[in-house]
Amino acid sequence: MVTILLVMLAGILIGFAINRFPRMIKLNDRLISYAIYLLLALLGISVGLNKTIIQNLDKIGVQALIITIGAITGSVFTLWIVYRVFFNSGKNEGV
Amino acid sequence: MKSSLIILSFFVAGVLLGITGNVPKLFIQNDFSLYALYVLMFLVGIGIGADRNSWKVLKTMKIKILFVPFGVIVGTLIGTAIVSVFIPDLKLKEVLAVGAGFGYYSLSSLFIARISGETLGVIALLSNISREILTLLITPILVQYFGKLAGIASGGATSMDTTLPIITRYSGKEWSIISVFSGVVLTLLVPFLVTFILKFF
C-alpha cells in the first residue's frame, strides 16, 4: 500500500510539470475513467464469484447506509459548529 | 450523478458476470487488478498535480478555511464511530475506514477491498455512493438548518466536483472556493487515511 501512495505522489509531481498542456490533462481524465471502469468491473467479478457477499447483499446494503448516515450527521454537526464559530461573524462574507 | 451511474453499471455488469460464472480463467487467476490500481493511482496523481485550480485555491486561502476539511474528518470519524455500535459484524476500524472514503467511492472501495477483503470493499462502495446521492438530495434542507457549510460537510470529497453545483446553488457562489478546497484536501487524504486506519489501528 505504501508503494501505491508513492506512485500517486510521483504522479502529482509529473502532473505539476504538465499542467500547461490542457490536451494531456483531458487525456489523463479519460484514462482515469477507463481505469476506474476496469477496476470496478474486476471488483464486481470477484464479488459475483463470492457467494457469501451475494447472499448477504441486503444486510451489507443496510450496514453501508448506517455508516453513511453516521458520516453525514457527524460532519454536518462539526461543520455547523465551525460555521458558527469561524464563518458567521457579521454578514456572510464568504471566504 | 450520470458518471456515478456509469461507474455503478460497470460494477453491476462485473457482478452479473461473476454470478453467472461467465468469467475467463485469466481474470480469476491473475491478480492484475493490483497493477491496474497502480496505474489508476498514478493517473489520479497526475490529475491532482495538473489541476491548476486546486493550486490557485491554496494561494487565496485564509487559515480558517482549513477547519472545513478538518471538521469533516473529525465529524465523519465521530459519527461513524457512534453508529458502529449498530453494526456488530464490523470492527470499529472497518467502519471508520469506510467512513474515511468521504464519498470518494471508486478509490476508497478499491483500496479497502484490497486491504480488508471484498465484503468491506462492497460496503465502502455502497456507503460512499450513497453519501454522494444523499448529499445531492438533502443539501437544500441541510443548508437551511445547519448553516452554509452543511452541504460541503455532507458532500465530503465530492464537494469539489459532483456535488459542487448543488452546494453552490444553495449556499451561494461565495462558498464554492471553500467547497472545492475541502473536496480537494479530502480527496488527497482518502488513500492515506484509509490505509492508516486499517493497517495501524
Image (spheres, coloured by chain):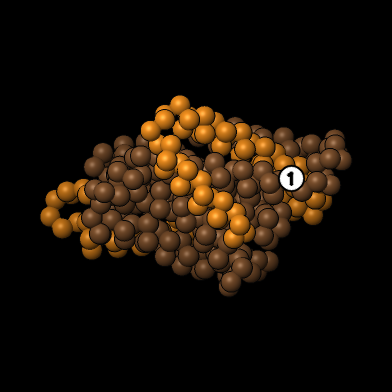
**What color was chain A assigned in the picture?**
orange
**Mark 1 sits on what residue?**
B32
Mark 1, Cα crowd under 10 Å, few <14 / some 14-19 / many 20+, is some
Residue shown at the point (64%, 47%) measured from the top left: B37
- How many marks do you count on the picture? 1
Is B93 in front, or is B154?
Answer: B93
Q: Give left or right: position of B174 versus A56.
A: left
Q: Residue A89: in sight, yes or no?
A: yes
Instruction: Please state the horizontal and vertical placement of residue B155, each as a whole percent of the image.
Output: 43, 48
Chain depicted in brown = B
Q: Is residue B194 above or below residue A24?
A: below
Is A59 in front, or is B51?
Answer: B51
Image-quadrant location for residue A39: top right
Task: Check disc 1 and report its element: helix, strand or loop.
Answer: helix
Is A42 in front, or is B19?
Answer: A42
Q: Outermost residue, bottom direction?
A: B201
Q: Residue A68: in sight, yes or no?
A: no
Q: Outermost residue, left direction?
A: A90
Residue shown at the point (40%, 53%) measured from the top left: B185
- Chain letter for mark 1, please: B
Instruction: Please state the horizontal and vertical placement of residue A77, each as a whole percent of the image.
Output: 37, 61
Instruction: Please state the horizontal and vertical placement of residue A40, each as a whole percent of the image.
Output: 66, 41
Is B168 in front, or is A30?
Answer: A30
Q: Is residue B160 above or below residue A79?
A: above
Instruction: Please state the horizontal and vertical placement of residue B65, each as a whole percent of the image.
Output: 28, 56
- In which quadrant will I find the C terminus of chain B? bottom right
* Amino acid type indicated by mark 1: Phe
Residue shown at the point (41%, 43%) measured from the top left: A16
Image-quadrant location for residue B28: top right
Residue shown at the point (30%, 46%) measured from the top left: B57
